[in-house]
Every structure is written in structure tokens, then in C-alpha cells.
Amino acid sequence: MRWTVLVLALVSLAPPADQKKDVKPQAAPQQRASAEGLAAQAEERAIAGDLAGAVELMQKATRAADASGDTWLRLGRLLDRKRDLDLAVDAYKAAADKLDGKAKGEALGRLSLVQQVRAAGEASAPAEAAAAADPGGAWPLSALAFAHASKGDEAATLARKAIDAGGGAAAQAASGRASEALGDLKAAETAYREAMAAPDGPLVATVALARVLRKTNRAAEALPLIQQVTEQAPGAIEAYKESARVKLALGRAEDAVSDAAIAAAMAEGDAEARSLQIEVTVAQALVNVAKNQPDLALQDLTRLRDQDPGSAPVRVGIAKALVAQRQIDAAIAELQKAVELDPASADAQFQLGYVQHVLKGNPAAALPAYEKAVAADPANPVYRTSLGAALVGVKQFDRAVAELKKVAEGPGYDRPDAWIYIGQAQVGAKRYKDAIPPLEKAVAIAPNNDLAYAFLGWAYFGLKDAEAFKKNAGKARALGHKEPTLLDYLRRIEAGEPIK
């Protein structure tokens, strides 16, 4: 009985069944991370080298309740460094919509520079808007310098202001673009390399450096640079265009086809991309000329002309094939049509000048076309060298020397041609002592160039130095030089006749 009572008592003291479970303390409501906190973590990741992780955190920051225009700007900077160009464009646009003043100017300026690589035709509008938001800011000034590159002096002024405003790598790149527009490729290369060396160097500097290397006959150096850009930033339309041009310069027309096609596909409606595609197609056809099959090239190019009669590059291609067949007058007719269709085409103007100068032997007729080619592409060393040679041919010696020195003293120039024509101009002007240094540079570059030795011979003839004349004219003769007047004087002086 007593045990029964005890058990009943214990049962009465036990909690009800629904109260036997452990009661856990309720968790405090979790606070959402702030945009600033996430942004700080993102920047730590970026400093540690984890750019992908930094971008992921910053993207979370833009979704935070307190996200601001500055949050989007910081995301844009990271995406820019990561070379996610499309996402960077979106981030900069979002930032610009939320910001004003200096910060808005930076967002729009950065946007413009990204567009210079992604789609250059869309770069001008944000540059102008950046300048409106922050007229004296480094980013707007840098972007404007690129957008106004066709006005070289104006671009140079804008770039200097950007540098003075503390624009860093972007301003250096802008300075390079201005120098390039003014034809100073040595200064442009230096500025682009300085911009690339900076941790925040804009991608446009790399594309621009590849272009300068191509223009200075160093396409082989440009190729790995531009390939790196297309690998890092698959949305870089302008990089694909430059890659195609670099491969054309290297004589790799077939390899250029895919780059030109990618650029045209990504930049639908872009006239430059379409023109480049045609240029590559023409270059492919002209491969047959190199194979000594100009008739096949002419068939392909004539078909292209019938499909697109308004294409200047196709006309130029036909002219090249006709030249290979020695149909010089027909080639001139095609080139004249090409320059009518596109007066600004540097290649068409140059080819017209070349045919008149070299194949027709008429430097006076070639001069206007060469001048237009140089005006259209002032940094092209071949165009300016040819202009200098034509000026020598029409006895404009002082102007010839001035034009040719721009080439010979340019960065990376390693050909004898400009030095030879400078020497020829100095001989023509009877400045015999001044002729010797450039001609000696020419023979140092090309020890087997008979023309350089011939003009050295004439320079020493003008100085009445018989021994030096015999030495250099004799070298020219040994190398196969056939000019009869020089050889006649050489025979007479070797026979003992003095120079009078």
C-alpha cells in the first residue's frame, strides 16, 4: 500500500507529456550583412589575390538594403580588373545612375574606357557625360582624350590635364593615345607601357600598344599581347579586330578570318568590323598572288567586286592582282575608283602612289596620293618612306629629309630604306658630308645593299675623296649595282683620272 501511494505521488509530480521535451532558447533574429561590411571583405579578398571571390562578395553587397552608387562603382572596378567587360559596363551604368559629381564622372569615365575595348563606337557618349558631371576630373579628361583622338592636339591637351589631375594609369594611356594620333609612336609606346605597368592599368592600353607595335613593323611582338587580351576578355571586340590586323601584317590571312568573323558577329552593324572582314577576304584571295597564281586571285576578287561594287578594299585587291599580271594601266583605273569610293583609305592612296612612282616611274604623279596616305595614317613608316622617296624624285630635298627622319628616328625602325633616301637627298642637295652618316647607318643595317654603297660613293665623289669613292663605288659594283654613270666614273678613277 505504501509503495502504491509513493508511486502515485511521484506520478502526480511529473510534468505532463507535452512538457517533457527540452526547451531550447530562441535564436536572436539574424542581421543581414551591410553593403559596407561586404565591400570591406571584398577588398580584403582582392588584396589577397582572390579577385573572383572579391567580385562575388561585392555582388552580394549590391543586393544589400543599404547598397549605394558607390557600392556599384566598387563592383565595376573589380569587374574591370577581372576583365568581365559586359558586367563591368552594367555596374558602371548602375553606379552612374545613382551618383553625381566627381563619383559620377569617375563611373562614366571608366565606362567609356571599357567601351574603347568592348565597342569603341559606344565610348564617346559616356565620355561627354562624364565631363558634364565632373569637368576637371581625371577620369572624364582621360576618357575625352580617347574620344577626341582624331583631334590630336586637343587630345594631347586633355591628356596633360588628366595627368595634372592625378589620373594615374588611365591618364598615361590617354597621353599615349594622343601621341599616337599625332604620329609620335615612340612617345605613344612609352606611355602605353607605363599605363600597363600600373596595378590598375586599363585594358585599352594593352590593345593600343599592340596596335603601335604593328604600326612599327613589330607585329610578331604584338601578337602575344593581343592574344592575351582576347583570352582574358572574350567580349573585347576591338581586341579581335586588332588581332585580325596583326595576323594580316604577319601574312597570316587565313588565321585572321576567325578573329574578323568574331568581331563582326559581336558588333552587329559595325561598319568597321564589316570592312575588316572584307579586307581579310581580300587578303585570302591575294595569297594566290604570292603563289604566282594571280589569275585565280583575280577571279575571286572580281566575283567579290560584282557582289559589292562599292568596296574600296576589293578594288585595291584587284589592282594588286593586276600589277602581278603587269596590267599597270588597268590597276591604276581600279585604284582611282577605290580612292573615289573611299578618299580616306590610306591603303588605296598608297597603292595608287606606289604604282605611279615605282611602276610608272612618275614621282610627281605619285606625290598627291602618297601625301593623302600619310595624312590618313601618319604613323605608317612605309607610307612616309615612300613619300620621302617621291620628294627626292621631284628634288624637294629639304622636305624629303624632314619626312624621312620621322621614320628613321622612330621606335624600332630597323630597315635601311629611310636612311638611304636621306643620304640620297643630301647628295642631291650637294650636302655631301651630311649624306655620309645616314648612309653609313644604312650599310650597318644592310651590309649587302648596293644602293647604299652607291650613294656613299657619290657623297665621297662630291668631297673629291678618290680613295673612299673607289672603295664604296667598288663595293656597289661587286654587289651588282648597274647604274652606268657611277660605273663609268669608277672605271675612269680606277684608271688614275682625278676627281675634278
Image (tube, helix red, strand yellow):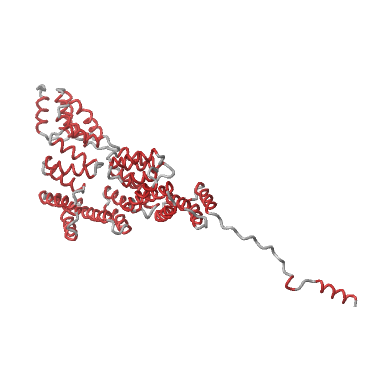
Query: Where does the image place residue 285, in percent across and percent down from the top left?
Result: 21, 55
Q: Which residue is at a point 31% across and 57% down the rendered structure image? A: 267
Q: Residue furthest right?
A: 2
Quadrant of the image occupied by residue 420: top left
Image vertical order of residue 105 relative to residue 439, above or below: below
Q: Quadrant of residue 402?
A: top left
The front one of 4 and 225 is 4
Report whether residue 445 is seen.
yes
Quarter containing the N terminus: bottom right
- Going by the image, does 374 lie left or right of 9? left
On the image, the x and y values in percent for residue 81 come to 43, 49
Where does the image place residue 123, in percent across and percent down from the top left?
34, 51
Where is residue 209 shown, x and y percent of the image? 34, 44
Q: Where is the C terminus found, in terms of image quarters?
A: top left
Indicate left or right for 318 with 148 as reference. Answer: left
Is residue 377 found left or right of 496 in the rendered image? right
